[in-house]
């Protein structure tokens, strides 16, 4: 559902952008027509796909089929459990480097033609990411099992004065 | 095929003078890097890290003085309202704000050092967040490019969310921070939507072009008025969020109350001022462009929109402050009310008479300047009382004139200044806004003067309540012994507000007038351009980029 909403927004934006070079009166009508057609097509796509499948496939219900598929193993418990916070740290680090790679790609494409003018700015950019990464490493946030640095930090956080410092 | 158009930019990168113009920002970034390098090399000791930050902020301040002097002589200053596609604008306004902001950053770090440094275990994180939001605010005041505005507002906001909920063991802080963040995220989404619509409608990221498009549409010769209005409204949601104008103010009391008091000071004083200065710049560009096109009379609905938002904002802020017992929360509502007063001055800008606009800008700049000092003083005293007694309830202020006269007297001056009573600085700010409104001599002006007068009367009660507690009541609480540095800071604020501001009122106002006039004089720009000059066709660069990345240019690459 969220995907559809997002696509709708993108479609509206796309219509506006495309309509922008020609400031005539028909713009809004085109926009609405485009939007309606987009919604209709989206609805039809899902509806036709699902109904064709429903008509074509054989109907053999079985309780096993309705259960959650978990790598072939029987599922244990609920999936709404509290995740370890460390997963989020890993996810954040991943996103940072993912974005960096996305920015590295166009840079790498033009690098040969631009030489030093491309090299130095990117070095600065890389340092901006690398130094905080080193900091994170050094502070023990990346250790899955908290080693000595992490242990020390943890004990500091658990000290009572930290709780008292609340506003 | 020719490589991307950006090649031109990299070949002509303005290394000398233009890099000097952004040197305070570069120093801020380097300080942030130093703050995270420090624990790697030297360990996490709070004292070491604070020393590094102090050196960095001082260096940035020195650089900011240099920049202010460089742009003051007129050679590279002034904001052309019809300027090209500069990403950054370094002029009197941004250099002046930068200077003040760095001074206040020093004050906030000083407050932190007095009150929180002893128990702080995460000093590097705190400083990185603080400096990051400072950098965002500097960017906010020195741009008129849609993309940069959005980015700068985000850059100033994201660290602020984390700063509000900095202490992870504190439930109230987590709640305030979460409210702030969710509200901020929604406002950012709305603003981005508005920005994308504006870009789509005007075909340009430069606010001057957008202003032209808006004026044409209001004159009936351009785009659909409804669509343009919606786009403008959406875009200004982001700005209104930063200055906590009324439909976007809900985060303010909770976040301000939950945050550490030095963070509250930072957000209420410097962050709000950044939002206002951004608004000043945008509205000035708008007026300049629209006025030059002779279409000022067509955009009167915008002036009325701002006026109504301003009237509701200050009325609501004042009424909500009425029954607050927590002084921090009371000051949060008071800051909403003041955002309303300052918005009123913004409504003056949009007027056929450019002299009227100048009066509005000058009054607003003067008010922002005075507001910085009176809020810093009031929050500073509240912080001292909080650290000494452990509470910011209004009862903690009872008998303060006996317990700590060096805190009570500046507090009285700051509060009376916030009301806007005659001998104090706040009166001058209000008076100048009043004059600017009166000079409009229109329904709008008289309406706002009336609202402002009524609000001043209402606000008198809750500010006076604290003063009465401090002076006329006494329940025998212990004498306070605040630190010398804190007392010096609040007393300096008070001295600026009372004798200094009054003695130098004329000179101060003429400086503000000068700043305001500068905004309308298109002199040589000091705009740092990062957009390649592709005239007309904005898709050329994107297409070239995609072509090149795909490796073959026979494909028909279409923009979405």
Image (cartoon, rainbow, N blue to C red):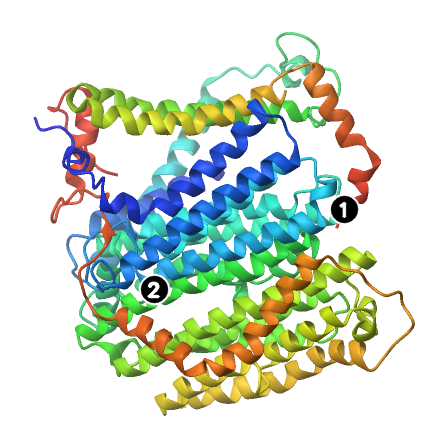
Residue B298 at x, y = what percent? 26, 78
Q: Where residue B293 sits in the image (x, y, percent)?
A: 17, 73
Up-down relation of residue B37 to residue B66 (above or below): above
Task: Tell me if mark 1 has few (under 14), some (14-19) or many (20+) residues whose alpha carbon lies within 10 angstroms of its own.
Answer: some
Q: Residue at x 71, y 15 (%)?
A: A148
Disc 2: host chain? B
Same chain for marks 1 and 2? no
Q: Position of residue B467 (x, y in %)?
A: 74, 78
Query: Which residue is tagged 2?
Result: B281
Q: Which residue is mark 1?
A: A166
Residue at 22% across / 59% down in the picture?
Answer: B209
Secondary structure under tag 1 reads loop
Q: Is residue A82 left or right of residue A132?
A: right
Could you tell me if residue B499 is visible in this image?
Answer: yes
Q: CA distance from mark 1 to mark 2?
A: 39 Å
Q: Kindly state the secondary structure of the residue where label 2 is placed.
A: helix
């Amino acid at each position: 559902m969220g995907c559809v909403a997002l696509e709708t927004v993108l479609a509206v934006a796309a219509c506006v952008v495309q309509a922008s070079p020609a400031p005539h009166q028909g713009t809004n009508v085109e926009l609405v027509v485009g939007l309606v057609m987009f919604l209709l097509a989206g609805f039809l796509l899902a509806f036709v796909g699902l109904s064709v499948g429903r008509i074509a496939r054989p109907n053999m219900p079985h309780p096993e089929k309705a259960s959650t598929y978990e790598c072939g193993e029987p599922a244990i418990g609920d999936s709404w459990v509290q995740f370890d916070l460390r997963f989020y740290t890993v996810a954040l680090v991943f996103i940072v480097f993912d974005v960096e790679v996305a920015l590295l790609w166009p840079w790498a494409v033009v690098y040969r033609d631009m030489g030093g003018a491309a090299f130095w700015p990117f070095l600065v950019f890389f340092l901006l990411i690398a130094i905080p990464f080193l900091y994170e490493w050094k502070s023990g946030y990346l250790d899955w099992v908290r080693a000595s640095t992490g242990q020390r930090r943890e004990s500091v956080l658990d000290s009572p004065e930290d709780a008292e410092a609340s506003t | 095929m020719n490589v991307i158009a950006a090649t031109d930019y990299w070949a002509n990168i303005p290394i000398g003078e233009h890099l000097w113009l952004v040197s305070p920002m570069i120093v801020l970034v380097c300080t942030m890097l130093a703050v995270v390098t420090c624990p790697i090399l030297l360990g996490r000791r709070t004292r070491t890290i604070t020393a590094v930050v102090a050196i960095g902020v001082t260096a940035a301040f020195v650089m900011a003085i240099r920049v202010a002097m460089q742009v003051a002589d007129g050679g590279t200053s002034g904001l052309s309202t019809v300027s090209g596609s500069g990403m950054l604008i370094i002029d009197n306004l941004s250099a002046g704000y930068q200077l003040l902001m760095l001074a206040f950053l020093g004050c906030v770090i000083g407050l932190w050092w007095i009150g929180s440094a002893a128990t702080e275990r995460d000093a590097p994180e705190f400083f990185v967040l603080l400096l990051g939001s400072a950098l965002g605010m500097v960017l906010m005041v020195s741009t008129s490019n849609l993309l940069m505005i959005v980015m700068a507002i985000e850059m100033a906001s994201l660290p602020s969310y984390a700063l509000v909920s900095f202490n992870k063991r504190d439930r109230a802080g987590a709640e305030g921070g979460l409210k702030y963040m969710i509200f901020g995220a929604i406002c950012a989404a709305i603003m981005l939507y508005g920005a994308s619509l504006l870009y789509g409608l005007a075909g340009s990221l430069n606010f001057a072009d957008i202003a032209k498009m808006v004026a044409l549409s209001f004159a009936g010769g351009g785009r659909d008025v409804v669509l343009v209005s919606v786009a403008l409204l959406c875009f200004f949601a982001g700005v209104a969020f930063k200055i906590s104008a009324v439909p976007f103010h809900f985060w303010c009391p909770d976040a301000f109350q939950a945050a550490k008091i030095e963070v509250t000071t930072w957000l209420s004083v410097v962050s709000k001022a950044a939002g206002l200065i951004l608004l000043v710049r945008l509205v000035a560009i708008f007026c300049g462009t629209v006025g030059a096109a002779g279409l000022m009379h067509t955009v009167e609905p915008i002036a009325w929109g701002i006026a109504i938002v301003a009237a509701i904002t200050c009325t609501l802020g004042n009424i909500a402050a009425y029954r607050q017992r927590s002084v921090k929360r009371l000051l949060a509502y008071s800051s909403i009310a003041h955002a309303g007063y300052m918005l009123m001055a913004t409504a003056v800008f949009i007027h056929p008479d450019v002299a009227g606009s100048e009066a509005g800008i000058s009054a607003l700049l003067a008010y922002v300047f005075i507001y910085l000092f009176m809020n810093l003083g009031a929050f500073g005293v509240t912080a001292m009382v909080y650290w000494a007694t452990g509470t910011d309830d209004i009862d903690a202020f009872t008998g303060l004139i006996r317990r700590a006269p060096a805190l009570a007297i500046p507090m009285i001056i700051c509060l009376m200044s916030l009301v806007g009573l005659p001998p104090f600085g706040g009166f001058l700010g209000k008076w100048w806004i009043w004059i600017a409104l009166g000079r409009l001599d229109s329904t709008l002006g008289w309406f706002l003067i009336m609202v402002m007068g009524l609000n001043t009367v209402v606000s008198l009660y809750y500010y006076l309540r604290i003063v009465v507690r401090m002076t006329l009541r006494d329940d025998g609480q212990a004498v306070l012994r605040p630190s010398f540095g804190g007392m010096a800071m609040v007393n300096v604020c008070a001295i600026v507000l009372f004798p200094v501001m009054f003695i130098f009122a004329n000179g101060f106002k003429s400086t503000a007038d000068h700043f305001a006039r500068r905004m309308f004089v298109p002199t040589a720009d000091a705009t740092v351009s990062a957009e390649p000059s592709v005239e007309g066709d904005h898709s050329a660069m994107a297409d070239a980029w995609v072509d090149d990345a795909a490796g073959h240019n026979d494909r028909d690459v279409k923009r979405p």
